[in-house]
Amino acid sequence: MFTGLVESTGTITQIENLGEQARYTVQLPFYAELALGDSVATNGCCLTVASLDQDTASFDILSQTLKVTSLGHLKVGSLVNLERALRPSDRLGGHFVQGHVDGTGEILDLSKHGQDHRFEVSLPESIYKYCIGKGSLAVDGISLTIAELTDNSAVFWITPHTFEHTNLADKKLGDPVNLEADLLAKYTEKLLSSKA
């Protein structure tokens, strides 16, 4: 379980293609605190540490993960958002994020307005139905509050801190991003549909 509060960013240093799967190596600041088998949300995808070496951790990426997330678009040198799994004693400052990506969207706007940035992302219908104004959506693992819903997108306002401490500064229009809908909305839908 994660909060969607990005702990730090890391850089992809190696991508090893393994048929339909892959192994990604990420240089990250907290490598010394990791152990084999630990979970790290990487651009919002819950990945398991497969190996550790000096200042890097490697993660095995399943073919299904490559199909349903934006991880397959990453290259050596790509900046990724990182968050270690939540400890029971931690404050929950974002929202409940599992690191189970529901789909991808595309960046439609990332423009500066004074100190802040307007950030707009397209939403597939499968995720749009879980979104409400002032609700939460994890975008590349960042817990964001939806400021506005259009017919097919969500608009967010990004503070200077979030822009400077995530991978948003490296993003461009048209880039794919991982989306995870609010867990409570998904459970509510399931509960209501089972009573019908």
Image: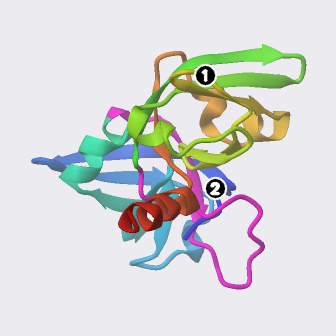
Within 10 Å of the Cα at label 1, are there few (<14), some (14-19), or many (20+) other Cα atoms? few
- Tell me if residue 28 comes above or below residue 79 in the rendering: below
The amino acid beneath tag 2 is: Gly
Residue 21 drawn in magenta:
no
Q: Earlier in the sequence, mark 2 or mark 1?
A: 2
Q: How is the image coloured?
A: rainbow
State which mark lies toward you, 2 or 1.
1
The amino acid beneath tag 1 is: Thr
Q: Is residue 162 left or right of residue 84?
A: right
The residue carrying mark 2 is 4
User: If the image is split into quadrants, where does the N terminus sit?
Assistant: bottom right
Residue 89 drawn in magenta:
yes
Which residue is drawn at the image coordinates 83% and 25% (left, top)? Answer: 116
Mark 1 secondary-structure assignment: loop
The residue nearer to you, when weighing 192 against 41, is 192
Residue 22's spot in the image, x, y percent?
23, 50
Q: Is residue 115 left or right of residue 178?
A: right
The label number, if any, that marks residue 150 in the structure image: 1
Within 10 Å of the Cα at label 2, are there few (<14), some (14-19), or many (20+) other Cα atoms? many
Residue 24's spot in the image, x, y percent?
34, 51
Part of the protein shown in magenta:
73-101
Report the Cα–Cα distance between label 2 and label 1.
Answer: 23 Å
Which residue is drawn at the image coordinates 78% and 73% (left, top)? Answer: 91
Which residue is drawn at the image coordinates 83% and 16% (left, top)? Answer: 113
